[in-house]
Image (tube, rainbow, N blue to C red):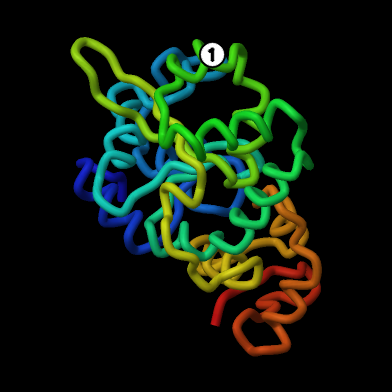
Amino acid sequence: RPLESLDEAAGWLQERGLLTLMPCCSLPSLFAACHEEPYAPGKRGFAQWPKTKYWWPFALAQRLRVHSLKIHRGKSLIVTEATALLADPLARTALAEAEEGAHGEDAARLVGHLAAAGPSLLDDLRAELGAVKRPRERLERVGAVVTRTVEAPQRYLTELYRWDQAFAEPSPGGMEELVAAAVRAAVLAPEDEVAKWFSWPVGDAVDRLIDEGRLARFDREAQILAAL
């Protein structure tokens, strides 16, 4: 059944916990669930977004306890707050590494500026720091920095937060919890695909979840995973 309204999309997000935009893997896709023709058939990029529902990701991200992250290897991932908090230990580690310079001097300068100035509009950061596109992309990819869209007269602005400004209190979670939630959202997923879902290494999280009885190989020959 296609999603007919933004409220239906919000309900589906709450049910699944996370949504990609375009279909790209076994994770549920918001735009695929719209069952709508693209804005400009035959063209690439944003032209493949749904003709009338292209604005839904932005509207969903404005809702309470919904976030748009780039932890899907740099691609947008719309998540509930509960799912976002599963990534908390990973994102806080990435933020600490960024402060120490592991993601480059420009990234360290960006997170340092946000620590001193607080959440900042992208235009203000450009005025203070110069070009911030590349460090922003590196930091968003690992959750150290997150963005929100702010509505202003006749336009929308982008505001950047450190992870610890968007989520003040540390939360339990980690790669195992994030993988378990993602497989549950997908319902069934090829095992070799799981390592490509997130920006951080999955390591032996799948094996540990199987040993704990939280995931199962639904089809051992094809190595299809299912959540239990």
Q: Residue at x 42, y 28 (%)?
A: 120
Residue lying at the far bottom of the rendered structure: 212
Q: In which quarter of the view is residue 62 placed?
A: top left
Q: With respect to residue 109, does 9 lie above or below?
A: below
Residue 202: x and y in percent read 74, 62
Residue 64, given in percent of the width and then of the height, sits at 25, 50
Front residue of 169/151: it is 169
Q: Residue visible at 80% across and 73% down?
A: 221
**Which residue is under mark 1?**
42
Label 1 crowd bin: few (<14), some (14–19), many (20+), radius 10 Å:
few
Which residue: 41% across, 35% down?
119
Three-letter code, disc 1: Gly
Secondary element at image label 1:
loop
Instruction: Work out which quarter of the rendered image holds the C terminus and state it.
Output: bottom right
For residue 147, side relative to residue 8 (left or right): right
Residue toward you, 118 or 78: 118
